[in-house]
Image: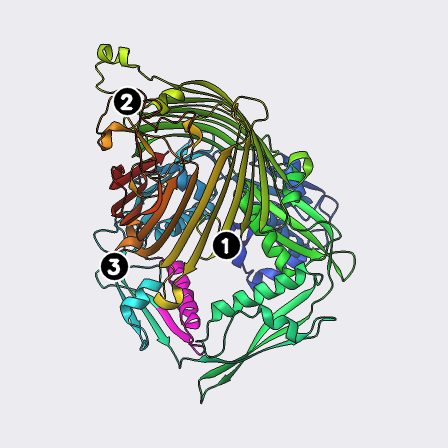
Amino acid sequence: MSGKRLVLLASACILPVWTGTAEAQKTRRVPSHHAAHERAGDGQVIEAIDVKGNTRIETSTVLSYMVVQPGDRFNQDDLDRSLKTLYATGLFKDVTMRRAGGTLSVDLVENPIVNRIAFEGNHAVKDEDLRKEVAMRPRAVFSSQAAAADRQKLLDLYASKARFGATVTPQIIKLSHNRVDVIFKINEARQTLINKVVFVGNKAFSEARLASVISSKETEWYRFFSSSDEYNPERIKYDAELLRRFYLHNGYVDFHMINATGELSPDRKNFIITFTVDEGPRYRLGKTEVRSSLRHVESKDLKQYIELFPHQWYDGTAIQNNVTGMQERLQATGHPFAMVRSEIARNPEKHIVDLLFDVNEGPHVYVERIDINGNTVTKDKVIRRALPMAEGDPYTPFDRKYSKAALQDLGYFSSVSVDQTQASAPDKVNVAANVVEKPTGEFSLGGGYSTDVGILGNGSVKQHNLLGTGMDAGISGTVAYYQKQVDLSLTDPYFLDRNIVAGIDIFGVENNYQTYQSYKEGRYGATFRLGYSYNNYLSQSWSYSLIDRRVGNIFSQSEISSYGYDYVPSYYVQDSAGWSLLSQLSTTLTYDRRDNRMRPRKGFVINVSGDFAGLGGDVKYLRAKLDAQYYVPLDSITGSHDWGLQFKGGAGYMGDWSKSSNVSIIDNFYLGGENLRGFLQGGAGPRSAHTNATTPLPGQEDLIGGRFIYTASAQLNFPLPMGDDVGISGRYFVDAGSLAGLRVKNLYTNAAQDKEKYTPVSGDTLTPRVTTGLGISWKSPFGLVNIDAAVPIHKSRNDRLYPIRFGFGQQF
């Protein structure tokens, strides 16, 4: 019952009662004919408050929630407020206030306690994922409102998985001691998938072309690994934005998205998505000008930063990138508050857009304080050093953007937000970095197959944020048919609290090359690493390695018969047998202008490296290498990010600087495999015949490498039909390269000098080997699969070919 009741007691006076359920109290209205009776009691003093019915909640706690207290006067408004306040706590199922003389009696019915929460009928969603959605927890107070709210959260979760027909029914099981079990009975229903995607109003682009732009796809049998055919209202909004960007990218300045809707079919089994668009005319760029109000910065000097050209189709993405690039250059060259805005002026008759870059001085704002919130493991200094600003530095909107990106790139947090608030003065702000920690440990087991090492298994234990210091530590091992390896590593990305990366690797590797070579190789040692950046693009790394190497399992002529071999390894391989100690100092200088270092689409990177062996040990050589990569997107031609060109090239040379050097073929350059597809690993270049092979065939030669190498590659990356849905992409490539220059301990190429040890060498030529072929990459649920098939266009006699390279791996 809600409202107030009039009760006739033995004293024959009329007294009011305040009572009702929680929901009723929100809308309770007191009838006007009761008002006279309630007001009649107003003004008398509350001598005592008698609380009854509370078993878990202390009386003092109940009194603390009430507005009225002993000594106050009976007042209708204060009693109403006390009643509502008690209900608002969520602790009580029913509250009744009764006045008896000078005493206010408060009768309570407490809400039960949740004993446990369970789910029944769920198969598509795990219990732990459902439990993350509900707010109720065991040993918390139960209320029907909380159960209803959690039911809606579960329905929303199923809706996000395209199960709009799902039903959730909370079942309450009463237990002793005012406890309840809450069981959510779930009927998941079948997925409601997208049956049709329709575009209305499009003239410049076909439905198929627009369908390739959006992320929502029509359901097909081959999309069993994809969720793109599941209806999601948020995804439809995202698709509308993708279409808007696509049209702006292609010159449709006046494009308007009229409507984007999803309609459930009459049988409620699938959805029909409709995008209604107004394309408008297509515009070209007219005049492009720069207006500068910055001191000491002339407009003409900024034109060099314009990467657009007149009469090209208007491209909103390119213009925004140009604005960002120009502003970053200005802020990096002594104008920290420089702001760049783009303004356009349409000419509808000529379908031309004039573009103006307006450069001016933004507000001068400085960072007063930086607060770090939410880090329970990661130390404050690890987060602060990742930020592109410090207290007292200038502050721009870009700083906020880059701060969030920098913290996300650390990989230590599940969510990151960067907020700003007004500080002690108008020109100062306080910046708060709010983070939520996530597990940074990693345990992985995996397996797969590689052309080079055969069937493999691997495992690793890593910690990417050791004790919250940002240090990376791990141990990993690989056991393959032709290789065994173990590696213990430790990396400090901010050595000595400076922008220096330092680390150490302790490793052991055993390679069995005897499927195509005549020896095994072992390497055991450590490498110390140090690296630093000069700026955002230029960096350098140094390393020192001390490695004990062994070339072994080489049989002599006398041992052949007992082991059943029908060949004796080349004298060049025999000369390399035994142990050697390598003490090597290395450095690499990198200039990187790629747009993304993990998945580059445009830009270039150049690496110049050098190795100096001979700081101790018995190996003394110099080795230099130059590598470059260049990426060209084909968006403007194909209208898709999936098309692109990739060019690679490299050259290297090595020589010995001391006659006392222990020359070993394992230090030489090798060509084939990854750097020349279509050839066996090391299969192109100098080869020496087995000592008992009079007329060597391709399988009767040892690969001995060389001192000079060059490689070149051109590759076209392209999408495949159904590729987006199953994670497959294709590539066409042309590889070229050559390897020459004998680098061996002794020469056995002169029969006149040593007829008994004369060993013919073939393949020692700079004439390029050239291959062409196709490849695919599949991001399968079981791991990344790479397959490359190549055929030679030009090769040398007896080069060792390997037409198909296959690689597969998985971690879980």
The residue at 74%/63% (across/down) is: 364
Residue hosting label 2 = 691
In the rendered image, the residue lying farthest to the bottom is: 349
The percent coordinates of residue 345 (x first, y second) are 53, 82
Q: Is residue 205 magenta?
A: no
Q: Identify the residue under disc 1.
A: 24
- Please tell me which of labels 1 and 3 falls first in the chain: 1
Measure the C-alpha gap from mark 1 to mark 2: 101 Å
Amino acid type, mark 3: Asn
Residue 236 horizontal/vertical position (percent): 37, 62
Q: Secondary structure at mark 1?
A: helix
Q: Earlier in the sequence, mark 1 or mark 2?
A: 1
Tell me the magenta residue range. Answer: 232-260
Q: How is the image coloured?
A: rainbow
List the residue tagged with mark 3. Answer: 270
Q: Residue 447's image quarter? A: top left
Element assignment for label 2: loop
Mark 2–mark 3 distance (CA, rounded to whole Å): 73 Å
**Of labels 1 and 2, the one closer to you:** 2
Please name the amino acid that badge 1 sits on: Ala
